Image (cartoon, rainbow, N blue to C red):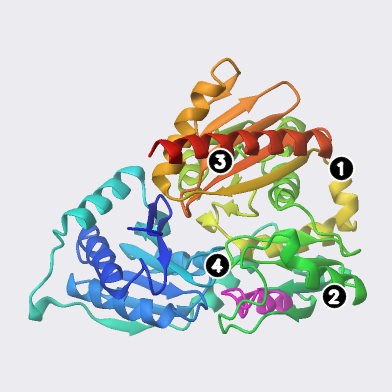
Amino acid sequence: MENLIISASGVRGTIGGSFSPTEISRFATAFGTLIGGQTVVVGRDTRTSGEMVRGSLISGLVATGCDVIDVGVCPTPTILLTSKKIGAEGSVTITASHNPIDWNGLKLATKSGRLLSADAQRQFQEIYKSEKANLVSWDQLGSVETDDSAIDYHIAQILELDWINLDQIRHRSLKVAIDAGNGAGSIISPMLLRQLGCEVIEINCTPNGIFPRSSEPNQEALKELCQVTKSEGAHVGLAHDGDADRLVLVSDQGVPLSSEYTYALIADFLIGRRNGNLVATVSTSRMLDDVADKYGVELHRTPVGVGYVVEKMEQIGAALGGEGTGGVIYPEILHTADGITSIAAIVQLLASSNKNVMDLVSLIPRYWMDKKKIDMPSQDVSEAVLDSVLTVFENDDLDTMDGVKRIWDDKWVNIRKSGTEPVIRVFSEARSIQEAKDLCNSTVETLKSLMKHVTDCN
């Protein structure tokens, strides 16, 4: 079905189109069947379609015998943390994360807040496609109850981390600007900052689901945050995506940082205290290699996606994991990207170092990245174009762990099909911005030519 995407991170589609109440109920009964009709934690971001999706979702879950704990509007990590807390068999976050406002979706997790394994994903899709959900009789239907403690619990867990020093943070008297994009972080993030002892400047922290900027916190979307951070004399500006599992930074001079710096700065701060290994995706910056070398630890690479990072983290007992999107995973809290805990990490880093953001950035070897995406007519076309790439670049040094990554001694470019929308993403990295842009642009032109060939042949 057009614009309906089923991936490792769950399901996404357009409201009024592919993501209909009928399809949502089908997904819900498939997930309820997968977890055997057990307890499920449900929450949502602020999108205006959230209530409609919630109704269809809960109906399907209850029909398979699931008892639903509804935590309301919360970030994805907060919802999954509640699932871990109560030992629920599963959780569902109603969100389309960074997708546009006309999209919504379901992020699925199984026991203790862990995202679906590859095997669980296959089982879920088989149940959905076969429509062989286990619907229970009238006397076995599940129940629904609400829980309004999720945000308070998440904050309490963060404040108990052994690397948080409240006295030190409060002594620094930090002023922080936070732009939640009117998304799921609108309540919890300003609340956490105040409990950490920061002076808070709220921007777009009204949880009404009307996004005043792109829900993906890229540099173009952060113009207001940059202006306010500088004009108000804030030490740092922070911004979330729609479901607040990501965090990106703006310097005290109003300069937006690449989302790659979130994980790099936090890793440089925390690995020195833990001496544990790191996990990152194939398209995350080489800054993580430098951080790993600095502390004599190993960096393990995975395909793009939080689920892959988590799986590798659990295999090796990693101290930290993440992606270049601004998502960082703290295993002592939860095995999922957590933009809320990242706020505490950045604030603690600023307080303990007594440096500003750009001083901290200067301590990490600098690379330049360029990121582009090409809209595709469908996921099938994306697949065909990616297959063609393998032939075109067959004589290069290639890594095919996730898409096609061309590697040189001092640069790389990764070409991969998105799992959440019908696009192909191109990430490049080099020692200069011009070299990164040239590599990215030439790759995009090649892909456009291949797409034209594929569509003409069909």
**Residue named by callout 1:** 363
Q: Residue at x 65, y 47 (%)?
A: 372
Disc 1 and disc 3: Cα gap in Å?
23 Å
Q: Quarter holding the C terminus?
A: top left
Identity of the amino acid at label 1? Leu
**Residue named by callout 2:** 228
**How many residues crowd around disc 4 within 10 Å: few (fewer than 14), some, or many (20 or more)?**
some
Identity of the amino acid at label 2? Val
Identity of the amino acid at label 4? Pro
**Residue named by callout 4:** 100
- Most extreme residue toward the front is 456
- Left or right: residue 449 versus residue 218 is left
Mark 1 and mark 2 lie on one chain; the one further toward the N terminus is 2
Disc 4 and disc 1: Cα gap in Å?
35 Å
Disc 4 and disc 3: Cα gap in Å?
33 Å
Most foreground residue, 314 or 274: 314
Mark 3 and mark 2 lie on one chain; the one further toward the N terminus is 2
Mark 4 and mark 1 lie on one chain; the one further toward the N terminus is 4
**How many residues crowd around disc 3 within 10 Å: few (fewer than 14), some, or many (20 or more)?**
many
Disc 1 and disc 2: Cα gap in Å?
26 Å
Q: Residue at x 46, y 49 (%)?
A: 419
Mark 2 and mark 4 lie on one chain; the one further toward the N terminus is 4
- Residue 128 visible from this viewpoint: yes
Q: Position of residue 44 (x, y in %)?
A: 46, 74
Q: Secondary structure at mark 3?
A: loop
